[in-house]
Each structure stands twice: as structure tokens, then as C-alpha cells.
């Protein structure tokens, strides 16, 4: 991998001083230069999905704290103040008057009452607590990986959009160069017509070619503007921001054997990490449901005091108050739940098997993506050499035709055909370069290496 010149410094001119100086330049000059790495970083810093992923991760950390808090001592205080307009009456046999067969109403309590208590509980034994805490930590890791997966896809999207714009700009530059040649040729032909050495029909033909090329330029400019809007949206950059993309499609040399020798490495793919983390969560859930068969134990202690004075003013009397306390161990033993735990265990076991199949399918997909990107890159690298040769021949033919036309030895159709061939050959090289760059991006993405350019 290190032998191949993928995303070398000649391809991506990373800013040495970062986005801060880019923004400073933008403020001074009115335009913001962006190389590919800066565009990637801007998208990652401002994309809503990435930001939401970070918020999910933060929420996961809070969930861990919440679970931890349930394992700490729990202290609760209670207080109550009561006024009883009607006192409760109960009925007793009249033993006091020696009439056990008679029922006598007896009023109990007082009109005023209050009580206060403090209770402390401490979890002593709960397998579910330990497993649940582990699950919360794993869930936080899963949120983090999801955010990284969003970054990975976003970086690929931004990279392809970046070079798609540059490819169209290069096509526009080629047409501008050819249009300049046609305009010069048109000037020459008009002079020849004025001197009686040329044909008016040639002037009209050149003017028609000029109009066609100018129309193509206008269409390409519109295409660039549309692509730039979509590119800024992918970066979530304000559309009014004026940016300049500084990295271009270069004709760097590549060696085919180096491409063929590349080996797949799927361990860097975030998608695979996500499945493995989901599987880990499934295993934890399985253990959690199994742990629910175990009893749980809590220590508790409470201190309370209550008062029932005859009148409101007796609250301050110590004779109206009584206190009590208790200490104990509370044991909760699950006995029967109608088969709920069993079905929960079976459901998670099915999820684990599905996760295994998902992993197999994902590995097959990664393998296909890697092989396709590798073959596409090799194919386009193979195409570059003959396409460059064809462009050189087209340039030679155009130069010769231009000279022959100026000498009156060749018809206008010959030079127009040569111009069309030259324009097409240049566009063919550009198209191949663009496909090479896209294949590079896909190959880096397939091996989980593309996101590393932000590190």
C-alpha cells in the first residue's frame, strides 16, 4: 500500500497551517481556498449527522453515569403533616364495664399528626447491574463508531464531489484553449477573405464552430455552478461563500504492478466494527436476561419519628414525639414470570445468529468493493497511456493541419476535424484521470484508509 502513490502530496496539497489560515486568507482576499483535506475537515466539523453522532456519544456517557448512580447508596427522606377533622372509630367489646357482649365505639388517634423518616439503601448483589453497566459502556462505543461511519461516508462523498468539479473545470479549460485557436483561425480567415485568398463559407463555418464552443462553455459553467451548490451543501457551507478548489487532476505516473499487488484489509472498515459491537451488545443482553434469574439483595436502614398531639400547640412537647428505626436485608427472588425471561433469551440468541450472517454478507460486499475498485483503477491506468498517446497525435495533426491551412494546402474541414479530434482526445484523457481518481477514492474507502487523511 505504501508503494502506491495514492493521495500523495502531489495529489493532495495538505495545508501546513490548517483551516485557521485558510479562513484568514478568505477574510482578506474574499475567496476561500480549499484543498481536499480542508474540504473533508470542514464537512466533518459542520455536518449535522456527525454532530448528532457526537451528541449520541455524549448521551451514552451520561447513561453510564446514570447506571453507576444506582449502585451507590440511595438516601431518601420523607416528611408528612396531617390534620384529621374526623377521627377514626373502632369497636371493642365493653370489657372495662364488665359487659363483653356489648360493643363499645372507641375513637383512636388525635386531630393532629406528623412523621419524618430517612432511609438508606445499598445494592449488595445484582448480576443485572454489572451486565447492564457493561452494556451501557458498549453502547457508548457503538455511538462513537456510528459517528465514525458517518464521517467515512461523508468524506467519500466530499472527495468525489471535489474532483467531479475539477474534472468539469478541466474540460472547460480545454474548450477555452480550443476556442482561442478557433478565434485566431477565424481572424486569419477573415484577413484572407479580405485579400481575396479565402472563402466566405470558411468564415461562416468557423463562426458556427465558435458559437458551438461558446455554448459548450456556457453549459459547462452552469454545470460547475450546480455542482458547486451541491458540494457546498455536502459541506454544509453557506452558499454565499466564495471558494477556490486548489487540488487539481494531475497526470502523475502510476505503475500497474503496484496496483495489482495491493492487498485487502477490511479490519479498518467502520461497518465491520459496527457489526462486531452490535454482536457484543447482543451477548451482553443475553447475559443480562440470564442474570435476571438470579436474586438481588439490598441493605436498608431507616430512622423515623412521629408525633400525635392532642392540640396543635402540643407539637413542641417532647411527650408527643416517638422515634423508631430498623436495619435489614431485603432479598428479591424471581420465582415465576410466565416464560418472559426464556423468550427474551431466545430472541437475543436469534439476533446473534442474524449478526453472524450480517457479518458474512458485509465481508462479501467489502471484498466485491475492493476488487471492483482495484480492477477499475488498473483498467483506467492502462487506458491512460494510449489516451495520452492519442492526444499527442491529435496535437501533432492539428498543428500540421493548421500550417497546411494557412499555406492554402488544406481545406477548412481538415483543420476543423483535427480540432474536434484534439478536443475529444483531451476530454478522454481528463475522463480517464477522473476515473482513476474516483477508483483511488473507492480503493482507499474499501480498505478503510480514506478517513485517515483527517488524522
Image (spheres, rainbow, N blue to C red):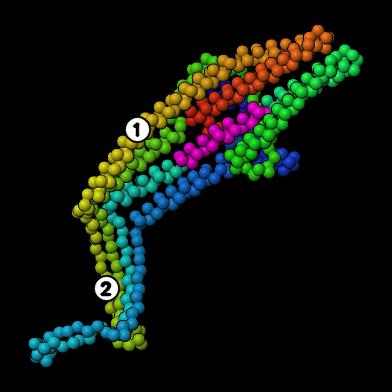
Residue closest to the eye, 340 or 278: 340
In magenta segment, residue 234: no
Q: Earlier in the sequence, mark 2 or mark 1?
A: 2
Between marks 2 and 1 in the image, the one whose residue lies nearer the viewer: 1
398 lies above or below 213: above
At numbered mark 1, what does the secondary structure look like: helix, strand or loop? helix
Locate the C terminus and report the quarter of the image it occupies. Answer: top right
Is 93 on the left-hand or right-hand side of 396? left
Q: Is residue 238 visible?
A: yes
Q: Which residue is at 15% across, 88% downward?
A: 104
Number of on-image labels: 2
Q: Which residue is mark 2?
A: 324
Segment colored magenta: 145-170
List x then y, in percent, for residue 339: 22, 49
Q: Which mark is residue 33?
A: none
Q: Quadrant of residue 224?
A: top right
Residue farthest front in this picture: 201
Disc 2 residue crowd, few under 14, some 14–19, many 20+, Cα 10 Å: few
Magenta span main SS: helix
Residue for badge 1? 357
Residues 64 and 369: in front is: 369
Secondary element type, mark 2: strand
Q: Position of residue 451 (x, y in %)?
A: 53, 33
Residue 94 falls left or right of residue 353: left
The answer to whether 177 is drawn above or below residue 399 in the figure is below
Taking the magenta stretch, the answer to whether it contains residue 164 is: yes
Question: 354 or 110: which is nearer to us?
Answer: 354
Residue at 66% across / 28% down in the picture? 168
Amino acid at each position: 500500500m505504501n508503494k502506491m502513490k495514492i493521495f500523495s502530496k502531489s495529489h493532495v496539497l495538505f495545508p501546513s497551517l490548517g483551516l485557521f489560515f485558510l479562513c484568514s486568507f478568505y477574510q482578506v482576499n474574499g475567496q476561500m481556498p480549499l484543498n481536499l483535506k480542508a474540504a473533508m475537515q470542514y464537512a466533518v466539523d459542520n455536518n449535522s449527522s456527525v454532530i448528532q453522532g457526537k451528541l449520541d456519544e455524549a448521551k451514552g456517557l451520561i447513561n453510564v453515569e446514570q447506571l453507576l448512580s444506582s449502585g451507590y447508596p440511595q438516601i431518601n427522606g420523607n416528611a408528612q403533616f396531617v390534620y384529621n377533622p374526623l377521627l377514626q372509630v373502632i369497636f371493642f367489646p365493653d370489657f372495662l364495664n364488665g359487659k363483653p357482649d356489648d360493643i363499645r365505639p372507641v375513637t383512636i388517634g388525635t386531630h393532629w399528626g406528623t412523621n419524618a423518616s430517612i432511609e438508606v439503601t445499598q445494592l449488595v448483589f445484582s448480576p443485572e447491574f454489572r451486565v447492564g453497566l457493561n452494556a451501557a459502556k458498549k453502547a457508548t462505543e457503538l455511538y462513537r463508531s456510528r459517528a465514525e461511519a458517518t464521517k467515512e461516508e461523508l468524506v467519500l462523498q466530499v472527495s468525489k464531489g471535489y474532483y467531479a468539479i475539477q474534472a468539469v473545470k478541466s474540460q472547460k479549460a480545454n474548450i477555452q484553449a480550443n476556442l482561442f485557436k478557433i478565434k485566431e483561425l477565424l481572424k486569419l480567415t477573415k484577413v484572407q477573405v479580405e485579400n481575396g485568398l479565402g472563402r466566405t463559407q470558411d468564415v461562416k463555418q468557423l463562426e458556427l464552430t465558435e458559437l458551438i464552443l461558446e455554448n459548450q462553455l456556457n453549459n459547462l459553467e452552469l454545470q460547475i455552478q450546480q455542482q458547486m451548490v451541491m458540494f457546498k451543501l455536502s459541506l454544509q457551507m453557506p452558499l454565499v461563500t466564495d471558494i477556490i478548489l486548489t487540488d487539481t487532476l494531475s497526470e502523475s505516473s502510476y505503475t500497474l504492478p503496484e496496483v495489482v499487488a495491493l492487498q485487502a484489509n477490511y479490519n479498518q472498515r467502520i461497518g465491520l466494527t459496527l457489526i462486531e459491537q452490535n454482536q457484543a451488545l447482543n451477548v451482553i443482553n443475553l447475559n443480562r436476561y440470564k442474570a435476571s434469574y438470579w436474586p438481588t439483595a439490598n441493605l436498608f436502614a431507616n430512622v423515623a419519628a412521629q408525633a400525635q398531639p392532642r392540640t396543635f400547640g402540643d407539637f413542641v412537647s417532647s411527650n408527643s414525639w416517638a422515634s423508631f428505626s430498623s436495619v435489614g436485608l431485603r432479598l428479591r427472588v424471581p420465582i415465576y414470570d410466565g416464560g418472559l425471561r426464556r423468550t427474551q433469551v431466545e430472541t437475543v440468541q436469534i439476533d446473534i445468529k442474524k449478526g453472524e450472517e450480517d457479518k458474512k454478507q458485509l465481508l462479501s460486499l467489502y471484498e466485491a468493493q475492493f476488487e471492483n475498485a482495484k480492477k477499475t483503477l488498473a483498467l483506467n491506468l492502462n487506458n491512460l497511456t494510449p489516451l495520452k498517446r492519442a492526444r499527442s497525435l491529435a496535437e501533432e495533426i492539428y498543428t500540421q493541419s493548421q500550417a497546411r491551412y494557412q499555406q492554402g494546402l488544406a481545406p477548412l474541414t481538415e483543420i476543423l476535424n483535427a480540432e474536434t479530434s484534439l478536443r475529444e482526445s483531451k476530454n478522454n484523457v481528463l475522463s480517464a484521470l477522473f476515473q482513476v481518481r474516483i477508483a483511488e477514492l473507492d480503493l482507499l474507502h474499501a480498505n478503510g484508509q480514506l478517513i485517515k487523511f483527517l488524522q
